[in-house]
Image (cartoon, rainbow, N blue to C red):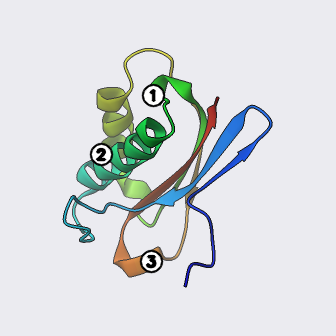
Amino acid sequence: MKNFSVTRKSNDLLFISGQLPIDEDNSLQISDCYEETMLCLKNLEKILIENNLSKDNIVKVTVFTTELSGLADINKGFNDFFEAAYPTRSLFEVSGIVGGAAVEIEAIASL
């Protein structure tokens, strides 16, 4: 039974719940912060595509990480994923993320 929504539309925005580094086989991939960031961003992109949007529609992301020392890897992931219009971003170090992941990313996109 779901106790949250993956997405929620409100006015001209799409809110996307935090995405974990889960691969195509629906397996959590614990890796370095770069690889986890890329998987989280790719999962956000899949949700955007399902809603007829692209990564260019992302206006705000919130990044949660258990490894602030991995900030350079997280930044590299963002540089490799986004081509032009970078979204605004907040980043927080947290004590834990579901499944032991080091990175989780949520987003807000314009419709």
Q: Residue at x 40, y 40 (%)?
A: 45
| Amino acid carrying mark 2 in the image | Met
On-image quarter of the N terminus:
bottom right
Q: From the viewer's perspective, is the residue at label 1 or at label 3 nearer?
A: 1
Badge 1 vs badge 2, beta-carbon distance below 8 Å: no
Q: Mark 2 points at which residue?
A: 38
**Residue 12 higher or lower than 28, as above or below:** above
N-term mark: 2 or 3: 2
Q: Determine the CA span between mark 2 and mark 3.
A: 17 Å
On-image quarter of the C terminus:
top right
Q: Is mark 2 on a helix, strand or loop?
A: helix
User: Neighbour class for label 3 at 10 Å: few (<14), some, many (≥20)?
Assistant: few
Q: Residue at x 36, y 70 (%)?
A: 101
Instruction: Return the residue nearer the eye: 24 or 63.
Output: 24
Badge 1 vs badge 3, beta-carbon distance below 8 Å: no
Q: Position of residue 30 (x, y in %)?
A: 24, 69
Q: Name the residue under label 1.
A: 54
Q: Position of residue 67 (x, y in %)?
A: 40, 62
Q: In this view, does 30 lie to the left or right of 107?
A: left
Q: Residue at x 37, y 52 (%)?
A: 40
N-term mark: 1 or 2: 2
Q: In which quarter of the image is residue 31?
A: bottom left
Instruction: Return the residue nearer the eye: 73 or 17.
Output: 17
Q: Determine the CA span between mark 1 and mark 3.
A: 26 Å
Q: Name the residue under label 3.
A: 98
| Amino acid carrying mark 3 in the image | Val
